[in-house]
Image (tube, rainbow, N blue to C red):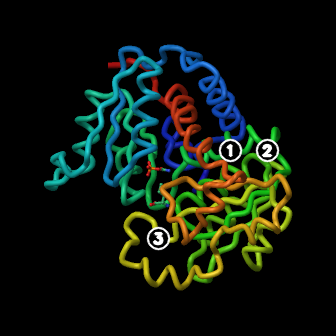
């Protein structure tokens, strides 16, 4: 993303690149404060309404965002895209213009990242990405909050990504690089992130003392790592490829044998929902090295931090 494009999007959170390092750390501090006391961020949304527009299913993101809006004193309005006129062909631009007259912030889970960009262009309220085909920035914030809780400092810690080069990988790689972490990535050929994304993450890593490298194998990625992270092999929308992906990702399961390469205190992240026996074994996700339940819990606290930061309050 160009500097100009980032500047245009100031006030929106579509991608990790819309943050800078100070804002990233500030959001993690705010999330910690919310975790200690769910009134700590104040009634920042009092009198305000936050829309959640969902084009795909959600458990964690939907519930955590709705609860976070309530904690900040606001009203959450959850909209399923296929129940709106959007589902009958009303344009994204017209939808954005109208919703901007009712809402103070619009949080969107979409099939197409470009739709988020269109919403920022046509609407007049902040847009927050609740997952697109390209990024899942709120998940990355919850992941870093979880790492920070367990490791203290983020800078210099090693995070191994073993699995699909998907939306969750893209956001976590960028956020970890911005936090000065060493990121090692292992995926089967043809399932990695684009070289443009890798270059952008390396630029962030260079600026913040981190590193982004492609590993030779899952074991190479996990070697001495503090954190091993993964996600499903077939994301929402990729279900027709499930069978082919199961074959392609053979050897990429996060299991006890892979964890034996990691640091003794290493722990595992997975954004959930998980497919036990595919990208992660039941023994690992339900075992003592699993941080996934804290990670899921932290979705609430990071959502509150993001809304308190990006929602302007009652401006109607
Ligand atoms: N991790 C995550 O975004 O979960 P949901 O799809 O349930 O929101
Ligand atoms: N990569 C997954 C994440 C789900 C929270 C997907 O997009 O379906």
Across and down, in percent, residue 221 comes to 77, 69
Dividing the image into 4 quarters, which one contains the N terminus?
bottom right
On screen, residue 284 above or below 209: below
Query: Which dot marks residue 282?
Result: none
Secondary structure at numbered mark 3: loop
Q: Earlier in the sequence, mark 3 or mark 2?
A: 2
Beta carbon of the mark 3 residue lies under 8 A of ligand 2:
yes
Distance between the Cα atoms at labels 2 and 1? 8 Å
* Residue 312 shown left or right of residue 29 in the figure: left
Secondary structure at numbered mark 2: loop
On screen, residue 242 above or below 96: below
Query: Which dot marks residue 234?
Result: 3
Q: Residue at x 68, y 68 (%)?
A: 255
On screen, residue 124 above or below 15: above
Q: Earlier in the sequence, mark 2 or mark 1?
A: 1
- Label 2 environment density (alpha carbons within 10 Å; few <14, some 14–19, many ≥20): many
Q: Quadrant of residue 31?
A: top right
Of 214 and 17, nearer the camera is 214
- Label 1 environment density (alpha carbons within 10 Å; few <14, some 14–19, many ≥20): many
Q: Residue at x 45, y 46 (%)?
A: 129
Of 255 and 64, nearer the camera is 255
Query: Which dot marks residue 144?
Result: 1
- Label 3 environment density (alpha carbons within 10 Å; few <14, some 14–19, many ≥20): some
Across and down, in percent, residue 68 comes to 47, 28
Q: Residue at x 69, y 55 (%)?
A: 268
* Residue 313 shown left or right of residue 147 in the figure: left
Evaluate whether residue 196 shows in this view.
Answer: yes
């Amino acid at each position: 993303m160009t500097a100009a494009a980032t500047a245009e999007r100031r006030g929106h959170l579509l991608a990790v690149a819309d943050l800078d390092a100070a804002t990233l750390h500030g959001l993690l501090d705010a999330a910690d404060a919310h975790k200690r006391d769910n009134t700590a961020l104040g009634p920042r949304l009092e009198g305000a309404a936050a829309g959640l527009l969902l084009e795909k299913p959600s458990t964690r993101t939907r519930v955590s965002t709705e609860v976070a809006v309530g904690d900040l004193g606001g009203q959450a309005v959850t909209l399923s895209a296929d129940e709106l006129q959007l589902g009958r062909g009303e344009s994204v631009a017209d939808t954005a213009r109208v919703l901007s007259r009712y809402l103070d912030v619009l949080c969107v889970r979409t099939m197409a990242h470009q739709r988020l960009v269109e919403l920022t262009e046509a609407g007049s309220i902040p847009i927050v990405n609740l997952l697109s085909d390209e990024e899942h920035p709120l998940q990355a914030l919850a992941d870093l909050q979880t790492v920070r809780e367990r490791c203290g400092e983020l800078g210099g810690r090693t995070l191994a990504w073993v699995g699909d080069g998907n939306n969750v990988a893209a956001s976590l790689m960028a956020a970890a690089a911005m936090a000065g972490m060493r990121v090692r990535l292992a995926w089967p050929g043809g399932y990695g992130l684009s070289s443009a994304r890798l270059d952008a993450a390396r630029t962030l890593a260079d600026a913040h003392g981190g590193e982004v490298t492609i590993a030779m194998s899952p074991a190479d990625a996990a070697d001495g790592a503090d954190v091993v992270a993964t996600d499903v092999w077939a994301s929402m929308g990729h279900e027709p490829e499930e069978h082919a992906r199961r074959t392609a990702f053979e050897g990429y399961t996060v299991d006890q044998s892979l964890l034996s390469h990691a640091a003794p205190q290493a722990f595992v992240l997975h954004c959930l929902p998980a497919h036990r026996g595919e990208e992660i074994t039941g023994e690992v996700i339900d075992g003592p090295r699993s941080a996934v339940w804290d990670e899921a819990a932290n979705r609430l606290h990071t959502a509150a931090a993001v809304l308190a930061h990006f929602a302007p309050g009652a401006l109607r």
